[in-house]
Amino acid sequence: MEAGCLQVIERAFAAAPDSLQYLKKHSLANLYKYLIFKALESFPQRPQTLAALRFLGHALRHDPSLLLAKVTLKVLFKIILLLILPAPRSTALLNRFPKLSNTSTILGYLRTEP
């Protein structure tokens, strides 16, 4: 999914005029925020969790203001729990604290206006 989306964004901005090139950074940041959400949507396995960590790095590179957002701590918390603890324990812990494990709020940080 990531590769296909990146191809579409690259093709779109290759055809876009120079006056719109500044939007590429925002588009990439939004893509990676969405991919973080999808990777952590359910209780993912280790590969999806590692992908979410990689997506977080890309999102922060394209949108450094995300570093100051509370949702970033929630995402990191969920990723660390899923990586360190066995699946049954991490699932039980995340179910115990649903507010902390709800990372869907990252979608609220999608930028529609640069």
Image: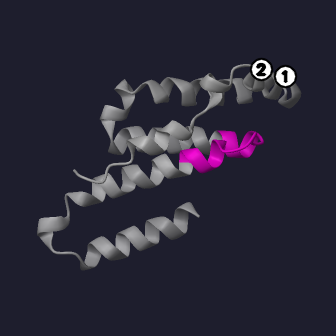
Identify residue type, mark 2. Answer: Leu
Residue depicted at x 38% and y 28% = 67
Question: Where's residue 63, x and y in %?
Answer: 33, 41
Describe residue 73's horizontal placement relative to residue 97 as left or right.
left
| Residue 6, image quadrant | bottom left
Magenta segment boundaries in residue numbering: 36-49
Q: Residue at x 39, y 27 (%)?
A: 69
Q: Which residue is mark 2?
A: 93
Amino acid type at image mark 1: Arg
Q: In the rendered image of this protein, does residue 33 appear above or below residue 92?
A: below
Kindly state the secondary structure of the residue where label 2 is placed. Answer: helix
Q: Are marks 2 and 1 in contact (CB under 8 Å)?
A: yes
Instruction: Give yes or no for residue 79 being in the magenta stretch.
Output: no
Q: Is residue 67 left or right of residue 114?
A: right
Which residue, as the protein is rendered here, is positioned at the far right?
88
User: Where does the image place residue 49, in percent across and percent down from the top left?
Assistant: 67, 39
Q: Position of residue 72 (x, y in %)?
A: 47, 29
Question: How many residues crowd mark 1 within 10 Å: few (<14), some (14–19), many (20+)?
Answer: few
